Amino acid sequence: MRIDILTSVPELLVSPLNESILKRAQSKGLVEIAVHNLHDYAHDKRRTTDDYPFGGEAGMVMKPEPVFELVEKLQSERRYDEIIYTSPDGVRYDQHEANRLSTLENIIILCGHYKGIDHRIREHLVTREISIGDYVLTGGELA
């Protein structure tokens, strides 16, 4: 299984992904985990990955351009079974969902951040939204 994780704060994931059970699974070749920095796909001077929503609502959302560019690059390399967005609106991550995901070959996980993502990302890329529960961990990346 290969898991590609898309995030604007990859440093936050280094320790959890390289310790304990996940470390052993990677060492045994059971899973390959690649973390991608969305800032690398933002082309403005500040490498901005978020912006105000078009509807004028409060808060910031992830811009579609870096996400689309990175997903298109990854999809040119392999076929993905799911593109998952971690969101409080998604289906609850439980043992049944963990079992289902374990049968897949390749998945992309788009880490939630701030208020959410631009609606175009949900509409055109995301195949499933998953929630770990009714609470927030930092900016949403750790979920």
Image (spheres, rainbow, N blue to C red):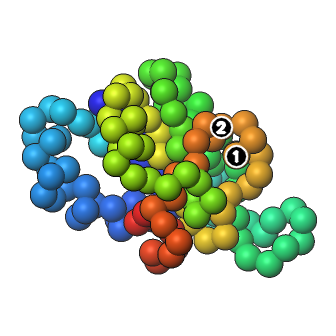
Q: Quadrant of the N terminus?
A: top left
**133 vs 33: above or below:** below
Q: Given contact means CB atoms under 8 Å apart, are the residues at marks 2 and 1 in contact?
A: yes
Q: Which mark is residue 72?
A: none
Which residue in the protein does label 1 denote? 122
Q: Amino acid at mark 2?
A: Leu
- Residue 64 vs residue 141, the one in the foreground: 141
Counting from the top left corner in percent of width and height, residue 92 is at 50, 55
- Name the image quarter holding residue 33: top left
Counting from the top left corner in percent of width and height, residue 90 is at 59, 54
Which residue occupies 58% across, 42% down? 128
Q: Secondary structure at mark 1?
A: helix
**86 vs 28: above or below:** below
Question: Furthest residue to the right?
Answer: 55
Q: Secondary structure at mark 2?
A: loop
- Name the image quarter holding residue 117: bottom right
Q: Is residue 4 left or right of residue 86?
A: left
Distance from Cα at disc 2 to Cα at disc 1: 6 Å
Q: Is residue 41 left or right of residue 143?
A: right
- Residue 52 vs residue 41, the one in the foreground: 52
**67 vs 58: above or below:** above
- Residue 131 vs residue 24, the one in the foreground: 131
Residue 12 visible? The answer is yes
Which residue in the protein does label 2 denote? 125
Which residue occupies 34% across, 28% down? 103
Which residue occupies 39% across, 52% down? 94
Counting from the top left corner in percent of width and height, residue 98 is at 36, 44
Which residue occupies 48% across, 66% down? 133
Residue 85 visible? The answer is no
Q: Amino acid at mark 1?
A: Arg
